[in-house]
Each structure stands twice: as C-alpha cells, then as structure tokens.
C-alpha cells in the first residue's frame, strides 16, 4: 500500500511527524508537500496528493491543514475522491468501512500526533465492506 501525504504551512509540523511515523512502520508514502512553514495555500499540495490517488500512484491520501476542513472540502471536489475528517478512530473506521473513503483529513490544531497515529492506523487497517447498497451510493457520488 502506498500513501500520499500533504499539508499546508499550518500543518507542516504534523505532516513531518506523520511522515516519520509512516516510515517507522515501513509504510510506503509520497510526500507531496508542503516542505516548510512559509505561508501557502492548502489546495496547491492537496491537489498533488489527490491526483496521485486518482492516477493510482497511491492507494490513499492523508491531507492536513489547521482544522482539516479546507483540505476535505477541496479533496471532495474531485470525482472519485471520498474524503473524510477524522477526529477519532471511530470516524476513520466508519469512513473506510461504510463509505470507502480514500482520503483522510486531519486538523493539526485539533489532533495531537498521539491521536493522529491511532486514527491513521485505523484508516489504513480497515477495509471497505462492499455491498450492493454501498456500491450504489458510491456510484451516485461519482456522477
């Protein structure tokens, strides 16, 4: 499994810690930026990660900004992307299991690295429980 990660400048520190955590777990990832704390726009880096998922260069993406909302709103503008904001392991679990989420959004202002690790572990471990109703709903979302 390969993961694309991206953040804006306000979540740069969280992204760096997430990158170190993924590396420690030997998870293959692509760091799509940002690469410092200079002021920037979250969508510039979120776009790279989302396009990696759409082009099958990565299986999933983790996007981070100050509250998670900006990245999530932006990611969900792309057909085929199902982004969720997760503040807990339960959020990550149901987002993957029931909605086949392929993008996890975290808020650096509300999520500690300790909690982020638990959320990420859950997001990466849980598989989509495919059934006719859920597949039908995802097709509607992609129209």
Image (tube, rainbow, N blue to C red):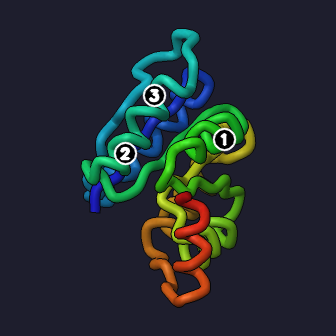
Residue 132, placed above or below residue 57: below
From the viewer's perspective, is the residue at label 1 or at label 2 nearer? 1
Q: Which residue is mark 1?
A: 73
Q: CA distance from mark 1 to mark 2?
A: 17 Å
Secondary structure at badge 2 equals strand
Question: Which of the numbered marks, if any, corresponds to residue 18?
Answer: none
> On the picture, is 99 further left or further right than 128?
right
Secondary structure at badge 1 equals helix
Q: Residue furthest top?
A: 38
Pointer 1: residues within 10 angstroms few (<14), some, or many (20+)?
Answer: some
Q: CA distance from mark 3 to mark 1?
A: 14 Å
Q: Which residue is found at the position 50% from the left and 53% from the top? A: 81
Q: Residue 116, position in %: x, y?
A: 58, 53
Question: Which of the numbered marks, if any, corresponds to residue 45?
Answer: 3
Q: Earlier in the sequence, mark 3 or mark 2?
A: 2
Q: Which residue is found at the position 54% from the left and 37% from the top? A: 14
Q: CA distance from mark 3 to mark 2?
A: 10 Å
Residue 73, placed above or below residue 96: above
Q: Are marks 1 and 2 in contact (CB under 8 Å)?
A: no
Q: Which residue is found at the position 38% from the left and 33% from the top? A: 48
Pointer 3: residues within 10 angstroms few (<14), some, or many (20+)?
Answer: many
Q: Earlier in the sequence, mark 3 or mark 1?
A: 3
Q: Which residue is mark 2?
A: 4
Q: Residue 112, position in %: x, y?
A: 65, 47
């Amino acid at each position: 499994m390969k993961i694309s990660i991206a953040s804006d400048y306000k979540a740069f520190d969280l992204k760096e810690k997430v990158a170190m955590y993924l590396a420690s777990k030997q998870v293959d990832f692509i760091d799509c930026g940002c690469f410092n704390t200079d002021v920037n726009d979250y969508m510039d880096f979120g776009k790279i990660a989302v396009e990696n998922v759409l082009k099958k260069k990565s299986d999933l993406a983790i996007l981070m900004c100050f509250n998670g909302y900006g990245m999530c709103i932006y990611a969900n503008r792309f057909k085929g992307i199902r982004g969720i904001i997760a503040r807990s392991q339960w959020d990550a679990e149901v987002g993957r299991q029931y909605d086949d989420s392929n993008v996890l959004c975290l808020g650096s202002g509300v999520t500690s690295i300790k909690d982020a690790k638990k959320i990420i572990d859950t997001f990466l471990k849980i598989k989509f429980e495919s059934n006719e109703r859920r597949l039908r709903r995802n097709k509607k979302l992609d129209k």
